Amino acid sequence: MNRTHAKQLSWLIALFLVASAHPQAGPQFPNPGNPHMSRDQQHALGMQAAAQVYQQMPVLPDTSPETQYIRQLGHKLVATIPPQYSWPFEFHVVAEKDINAFALPGGPMFVNVGAIVAAANEAQLAGVMAHEMSHVYMQHSAKQENKAEWTSGLAGLAGGILGATTGGGMLGQLAQAGVQFGAQGIMLKYSRTDESQADAVGAIILYKAGYNPQALADFFKTLEAQGGAPPQFLSDHPNPGNREQAIEHEISAWPPQQYAGDSVAFQKVRQHASGVKTYTAEEIAQGAKTGQWSGHNSRNGAAFSSSGNTPAATAVSTRTPSAAVSLQNVLPSQKMVATQLGPMQMARPENWPVTPPQHQADYLTIAPAAGVTNNGVGYGVLIGAAKTKGQAINMDTITMELVEQLQRSHGVKPVSNPQAIGLNGVQGRSVMMESTSPFPASNGQQQPERDWLVTVPQANDVIVFFIFVAPQSEFPRFQPTYEAMLKSLQF
């Protein structure tokens, strides 16, 4: 399903906006505050720094198992953050032995292979990532000293030269924001107060994603117990003191829940990562001096887009439409997990994360990481809502109006008339449609896509709709899963 959206359609609203009116029990995210710089400025700075990382560090290609897994896990965590406070997070993996991870202003995040191998389970790795995401959430870099100088310097940032070695230009602005490049790679300057806040917000992210928040403290405890020189992560992230006790106190009053156990996917990726060629910080620093990593990354297919326009919903995968996807990477897990989507609950495959919409005209998606490209969702479910302006709901009429709009905006065409479909006592409508898949067939040629539209009436003149997508030749494999998802639907 192509991502071009019909923003002129006034009655098309995002389901996530409807869901926001139904707060869930448990801990609530704090207001991150308002630093003296805009979101666009922070994002622009982060994208500039991320491009610098690709010049100075060996980065795994987007198609690597480690990157695909980290992106899937990352978007599971991002889905917990309220949209008004979220950022267009992107996830990358650095081929470095050291146990480290860092997130740049505006959302770019990098996880070392060493951190994947060092984590004992998925919850610990998720804890490291949630902690880093929390620094972005709280806008700690934007709250560094010299904010006035940084803000004025951002005006000329776009014309700065990447790779500058002086204190001016982009690197000078990064240094003022507490982000530096040096002999040990990238370094971020965080205070103990920053660390305490990142622990607290990271615990909330973990909890809402279904992980035990204690896993974050467990990971830090493991690192602190190591002999010899401490891992780079600990020098980047000063211990605020009583970390474990603080987290235990934070979560003690939260409603109990059944936490997710370890995953087979994590253990498989961890095993694969242990065999990946990695480099020490000293080797990386030496290679950066000679320009080794720029060519290395280019040859390996690790390219970075500095446009800054990639939303979180599309950052799951940057696979180009010229590359066919392996069916094994998109098939749904047989294990289904109940997921609360605001006013409704639906079961989804465990390996298909939920990605909230970033704009009012976007869809909420449930899709495998490898099934999403910059050009659209090729496997999975898109969810939205339509409002009828106070008119009485005629399901046949409103469904056909939606089909016509999808024809104009997405190029789909119906191949059947609306059919009645019962969904737990509610009468909806079902329409089969066709379009062109963003993924080519195995021979490299374009292939048709089957798009199954299901509309469901709700209160307050709202229609919730689902678009289940897969290439036409493979749709029968996915349809049983799609039917199971609909059967599980509860409002």
Image (cartoon, grey):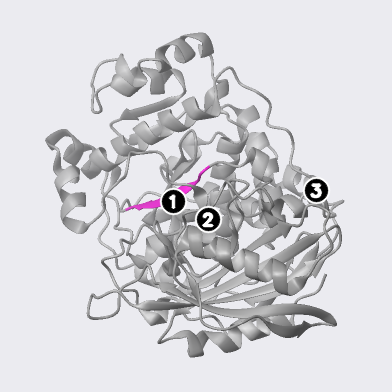
Left or right for 407, reference 95: right
Kindly identify which numbered label has been placed on residue 91.
1
Kindly identify which numbered label has been placed on residue 74.
2
> Type of residue at label 2?
Gly
Answer whether residue 260 is visible to the viewer in this image.
Answer: no
Residue nearer the viewer, 269 or 325: 325
Magenta-tinted stretch: 88-94
* Element under disc 3: loop
Quadrant of residue 170 within the rendered picture: top left
Left or right for 366, reference 196: left
Residue nearer the viewer, 9 or 127: 9
Marks 3 and 1, the one that precedes in the sequence: 3
Image position, residue 106 (x, y; %):
49, 35
Is 228 located above or below residue 375 in the figure? above
> Type of residue at label 3?
Pro
Kindly report the distance in space between the C-alpha atoms of the residues bearing marks 2 and 3. Answer: 20 Å
The question of residue 171 being in magenta is answered with: no
Image position, residue 43 (x, y; %):
47, 33
Left or right for 23, reference 38: right
* Element under disc 1: strand
Toward the left, the furthest residue is 290
How packed is label 3: few (under 14 Cα within 10 Å), some, or many (20 or more)? some
Judging by the rendered image, the residue that carries numbered circle 3 is: 27
Image position, residue 137 (x, y; %):
61, 37
Quadrant of residue 124 within the rendered picture: bottom right
Answer whether residue 180 is visible to the viewer in this image.
Answer: yes
